[in-house]
Image: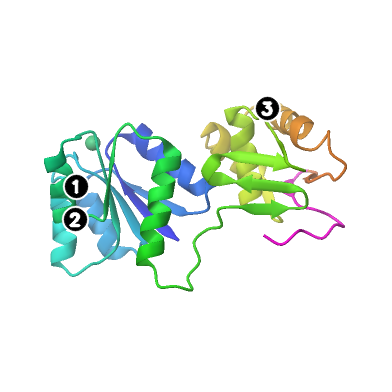
Amino acid sequence: MRLLVIEDEARIARQIQSGLQEAGFEVEIAATGEAGLVSVLSGNFDGLIVDVMLPGFSGFELVRALRERGLKVPVLFLSARDSTADRVRGLEEGGDDYLVKPFAFPELLARIRALLRRAVPSGEALPASQIRIADLVWEPDQRRITRSGKRIDLTPKEYALAALLLQHHGEVVGRLQIARHVWELEFEPAGNTVDVQLRRLRAKLDDPFEIKLVHTLRGVGYVLEARGVASAPA
Ligand code: CA
């Protein structure tokens, strides 16, 4: 499922992007109404998250332009404006839902899921809201990981690393990929930063439990998988 976030505040756009990616969506960002329009017309998106106050033309104008072209892609408006008139206008301009900033991320995710469930023809699956690997259960919407029913308390960086490995479970995740996701770096951090972070995660996620899930492929990266045990059905 591909989503486009049209938001001029880079920090908010990145937060939404990484949260949605952790929940299993593919996410692109556009920073202006013009860029958003170009992306929507050229890309194949299943849903849009559109900030109302954008440089150039507004989110309302953007969505009106899309609807005039006959595009039915579902739209969730984001806005700091909380008047009833604005909400009504958002829906009249062709939006499907409206969320007021500041918002809690789980609410954004829940609304996006609801929007896509209504809009997407049945049969095309949304990313799972729960992933099970052996005795581990990951609920991305709640940012919760449990093992054998016990909640694992993680720092934000540990959680980001765990989510990355879980998203790609069964695949090798490279050190650069980890650096990008956890520290937003375009290079591998110096020294043993990645290994230290991995060790911290393992101490909480693996060490107390019999089945080890995080495995090292020396010189390549890491893989999260249950080896030699059948995964419980999701
Ligand atoms: Ca804005």
Q: Could you tell me how far apart the alpha carbons at marks 2 and 3 are, in whole angstroms?
A: 44 Å
Judging by the rendered image, the residue that carries numbered circle 2 is 63
Determine if the magenta segment contains residue 222: yes
Q: Quadrant of residue 118?
A: bottom left
Three-letter amino acid code at the position of disc 3:
Thr
> Can residue 136 be seen in the rendering of this structure?
yes
Q: Secondary structure at mark 1?
A: helix
In the rendered picture of this protein, how many numbered marks are placed on residues? 3
Question: Which part of the image, by quadrant, shows the C terminus?
Answer: bottom right
Are the residues at dot 1 and dot 3 in contact (C-beta closer than 8 Å)? no
Determine if the magenta segment contains residue 2: no
Residue plotted at (11% across, 42% down): 85
Q: Secondary structure at mark 3?
A: helix
Question: Which part of the image, by quadrant, shows the N terminus?
Answer: bottom left
Span highlighted in magenta in the image: 219-234
Residue 59's disc is 1
Q: Is mark 3 within 8 Å of ligand 1?
A: no
Q: Position of residue 188 (x, y in %)?
A: 61, 35
Residue plotted at (71% across, 62% down): 233
Height in image: 198 above or below 174? above
First in sequence: mark 1 or mark 3? Answer: 1
Q: Position of residue 122 (x, y in %)?
A: 44, 73
15 vs 127, left or right, is left
Three-letter amino acid code at the position of disc 2:
Val
Q: Residues within 10 Å of mark 3 (few under 14, many from 20)?
A: few
89 vs 153, left or right, is left
Front in this rendered view, residue 57 or 104: 104
Judging by the rendered image, the residue that carries numbered circle 3 is 193
Q: Residues within 10 Å of mark 1 (few under 14, many from 20)?
A: many
Q: Could you tell me how far apart the alpha carbons at marks 1 and 3 are, in whole angstroms?
A: 41 Å
